[in-house]
């Protein structure tokens, strides 16, 4: 009697599990149909950086690489071999009946571990090139699928054609012929011969930032129609908003609103996503302070190739000097404010860009007068004012990875016929 | 011997540098001027034993087929989102909601793989799921994507073209960590994948047309499904007419008649578009066969016709490649027509009015 009760209980348990977990029943039926299991896959990336690169931990799951470099990817699985012999005993009487279909999928992983597909290559090859346009974490997945003889059609006969529109189609009068006759739900004929065997593998990579940050510097003069901001911080905030809106790239006339009359110096990666050895920054200017006569200009003044700042860390440095930008020309007796902003494709701190005006010879930092810069004695042309000090505008920006952009250009005070003592927005 | 000592030291120094310095991109300097692949091994070398005549896709592969580290492969099954099995036959352009069921979505990862214990194994992130639709005949794969928020294991799959041999493939990767040695954690990926064979039926009628030439003048009409891959039925199509015989002014202009129901009752009105034929001359007909699968050549009919209860009744003597217009007795309301059926039985009949010139 006790045994009978146990049998009944077991039967009830089995019935309950069948009802609650129908997909498990599906998995059981697979085994019954003697389908081959997915084989393992090996996946590698060549040319990665050492495990401890930039302080990363070994075994953290990501191969260290550089953003924008090209890496060779290769993979291998017995699924791709000439015969299925190495798939095991169950495959001994089977044959591959198609070449493999091979997809390479690159996903970018966010801080929460969620990932988004950024690229998929269906090249049907076991090798591929990997490029990673932004710093950060990526997953590279290879998915292979291939027809192999034997086994049974995995799809079930109970599909009932719910996905086929035969009824509505014939009802439309458009083409009543294409309906049920062509549909063979669950028949396992034609497309169902053999098994669609798959294999997949994923590796993680960490793409390190090797791009120097973009810098924007705005010079706002308090003269004519221009009014300077209440403070340098207010000017910096406004600049930050407008820089963010244009993704840090220069178009010549993007400053608007309170900055419409201001002069802009913009240093930004151009072209974007160049190979690490070919990183170049464009130096663009817009406004009157970049011309000795005060004529407003709007142009890309030149390009600067990044240099390697630290070989071991592979950081980059962009240095903008006099050879690219002759100087900044401010007017005597015209107060002005300077504010800079930083933007980067990797991690950075918004306050990690600093700018100052200094005496080029002594390094003495020039202080503001009543909250604004104001030079009362001209020093340009140099031939006329050789006794006056040469000033230098300096800006330095650094991202969290250590890539830097540095600006060091002369700042000249030009004599003008008109003197503006006011202009500050009190 | 003495003269060789410095050379030997130099060689040893170079060798030591080669070993000590990191490989790959660390070797880049500002003077490098290349965007070659960053490789630690010669690229393009294929491992001995791989026959590239038989497995050309393995060109350049020189790694073993199994990873040197534990990367568990878990079973997976593709089902419909409602838990039912996937039908063996799907219809083109019809979206189905599929799901994948696998232990990879479970609470805990496997604690061992291939006999190797994975101490304290725990998931280190969510699963990433990739869905593909494979046209096995063409060996082309299309990645499925969906902007609609769905559970991680679900995907809307819409086969866009008919195929007798298709496949739905899903692959899943999920990071896991385990204690490789006391106090040292390693992150690897568990994997799962599954493929199903499916057949995709054709529900799109052909989009055929005709080119008619009389003397030196031609007129061509054809149609194109618009919007493409439209569903639910009926599908719509735009009809294009081009050439001097399609224009009242005999100019080579193009007329587009938008929004006709694609199928067996595509009849234009004279206001929408017409073919203008002279009373005399030899008319030559060239049929333009178009279908997303294949037109059944045996079903194709063309020529002049009149419509009886909406059905084209051919004018005798006009169903061949050419006919003499002066010998044809035209009905009151003549049409030029093309009638074609694809291999799946979808039929298209397109009738364009014929006007005298």
Image: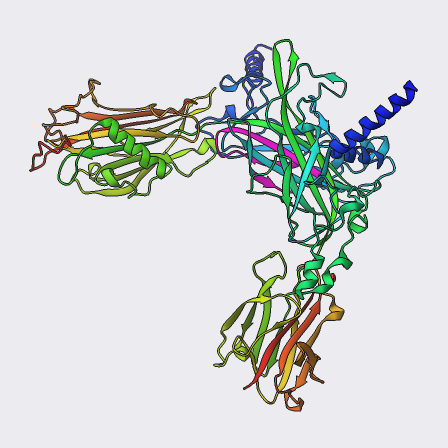
Q: Residue at x 63, y 78 (%)?
A: B336
Q: How many marks?
A: 0
Residue in front for this viewpoint, B159 or A334: B159
Q: Residue at x 64, y 90 (%)?
A: B326
Residue B140: image location, x then y, percent: 67, 47
Residue B219: image location, x then y, percent: 57, 76
Majority SS type along the magenta span? strand
Residue A382: image location, x then y, percent: 14, 30
Furthest toward the right, the residue is A1
Left-right relation of A329 to B127 = left
> Which residues lie in the magenta part?
A119-144
Residue in front for this viewpoint, B9 or A113: A113
Is A128 magenta? The answer is: yes
- For residue A389, above or below residue A132: above
Residue A236 appears in which quarter of the rendering? top left
Residue B347: image location, x then y, percent: 69, 67
- For residue A347, above or below residue B146: above
Task: Name the quadrant of the N terminus of chain B.
Answer: top right
């Amino acid at each position: 009697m006790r045994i009978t009760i146990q049998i009944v209980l077991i039967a009830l348990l089995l019935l309950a599990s069948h009802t609650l977990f129908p997909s498990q029943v599906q998995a059981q039926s697979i085994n019954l149909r003697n389908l081959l299991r997915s084989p393992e896959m090996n996946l590698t990336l060549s040319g990665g950086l050492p495990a401890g690169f930039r302080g990363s931990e070994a075994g953290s799951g990501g191969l260290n690489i550089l953003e924008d470099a090209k890496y060779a990817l290769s993979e291998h699985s017995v699924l791709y071999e000439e015969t299925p012999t190495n798939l095991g005993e169950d495959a001994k009487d089977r044959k591959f009946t198609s070449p493999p279909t091979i997809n390479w999928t690159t996903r970018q992983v966010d801080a929460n571990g969620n990932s988004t597909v950024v690229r998929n290559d269906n090249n049907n090859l076991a090798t591929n090139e990997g490029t990673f346009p932004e710093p950060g974490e990526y997953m590279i997945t290879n998915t292979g699928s291939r027809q192999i003889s034997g086994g049974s059609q995995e799809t079930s006969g109970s599909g009932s054609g719910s996905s086929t529109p035969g009824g509505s189609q014939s009802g439309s009068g458009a083409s009543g012929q294409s309906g049920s006759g062509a549909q063979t739900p669950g028949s396992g004929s034609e497309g169902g011969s053999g098994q669609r065997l798959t294999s997949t593998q994923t590796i993680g990579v960490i793409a390190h930032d090797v791009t120097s940050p973009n810098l924007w510097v705005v010079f706002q003069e308090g003269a004519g129609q221009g009014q300077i901001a209440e403070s340098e911080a207010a000017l910096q905030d406004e600049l930050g908003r407008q820089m963010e809106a244009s993704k840090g790239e220069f178009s010549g006339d993007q400053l608007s609103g309170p900055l419409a009359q201001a002069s802009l110096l913009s240093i930004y990666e151009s072209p974007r996503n160049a190979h690490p050895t070919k990183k170049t920054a464009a130096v663009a200017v817009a406004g009157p302070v970049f011309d000795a006569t005060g004529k407003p200009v709007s142009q890309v003044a030149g390009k600067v190739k990044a240099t390697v700042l630290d070989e071991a860390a592979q950081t980059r440095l962009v240095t903008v000097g006099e050879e690219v930008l002759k100087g900044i020309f401010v007017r005597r007796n015209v107060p002005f404010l300077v504010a800079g902003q930083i933007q980067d494709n990797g991690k950075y701190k918004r306050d990690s860009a600093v700018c100052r005006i200094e005496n080029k010879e002594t390094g003495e930092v020039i202080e503001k007068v009543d909250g604004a810069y104001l030079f009362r004695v001209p020093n340009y042309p140099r031939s006329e004012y050789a006794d006056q000090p040469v000033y230098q505008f300096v800006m330095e920006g650094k991202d969290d990875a250590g890539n830097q952009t540095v600006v060091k250009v002369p700042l000249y005070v030009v004599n003008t016929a008109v003197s503006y003592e006011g202009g500050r927005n009190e | 011997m003495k003269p060789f000592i410095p050379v030997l030291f130099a060689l040893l120094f170079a060798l030591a540098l080669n070993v000590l310095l990191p490989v790959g991109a660390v070797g880049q300097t500002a003077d490098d001027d290349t965007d070659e692949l960053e490789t630690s091994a010669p690229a393009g070398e294929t491992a001995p034993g791989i026959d590239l005549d038989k497995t050309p896709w393995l060109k350049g592969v020189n790694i073993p087929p199994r990873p040197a580290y534990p990367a568990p492969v878990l079973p997976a099954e593709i089902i419909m989102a409602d838990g039912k099995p996937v039908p063996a036959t799907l219809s083109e352009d019809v979206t189905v909601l599929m799901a994948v069921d696998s232990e990879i979505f479970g609470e805990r990862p496997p604690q061992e793989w291939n006999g190797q214990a994975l101490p304290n194994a725990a998931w280190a992130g969510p699963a990433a799921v990739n869905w593909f639709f494979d046209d096995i005949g063409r060996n082309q794969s299309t990645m499925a994507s969906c902007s609609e928020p769905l559970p991680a294991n679900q995907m809307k799959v819409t086969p866009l073209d008919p195929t007798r041999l298709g496949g739905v493939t899903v692959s899943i990767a999920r990071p896991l960590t385990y204690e490789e040695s006391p106090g040292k954690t390693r992150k690897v990926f568990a994997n799962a994948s599954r493929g199903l064979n499916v057949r995709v039926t054709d529900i799109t009628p052909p989009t055929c047309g005709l080119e008619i030439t009389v003397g030196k003048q031609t007129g061509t009409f054809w149609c194109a499904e618009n919007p493409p891959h439209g569903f639910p039925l009926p599908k719509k199509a735009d009809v294009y007419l081009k050439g001097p015989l399609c224009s009242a002014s005999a100019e080579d202009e193009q007329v587009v008649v938008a929004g006709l129901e694609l199928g067996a009752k595509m009849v234009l009105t004279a206001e929408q578009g017409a073919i203008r034929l002279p009373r005399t001359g030899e008319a030559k007909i060239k049929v333009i066969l178009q279908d997303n699968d294949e037109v059944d050549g045996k079903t194709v009919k063309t020529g002049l016709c009149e419509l009886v209860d909406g059905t084209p009744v051919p004018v005798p003597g006009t169903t061949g490649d050419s006919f003499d217009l002066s010998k044809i007795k035209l009905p009151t309301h003549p049409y030029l027509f093309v009638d074609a059926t694809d291999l799946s039985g979808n039929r298209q009949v397109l009738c364009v009015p014929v006007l005298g010139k």
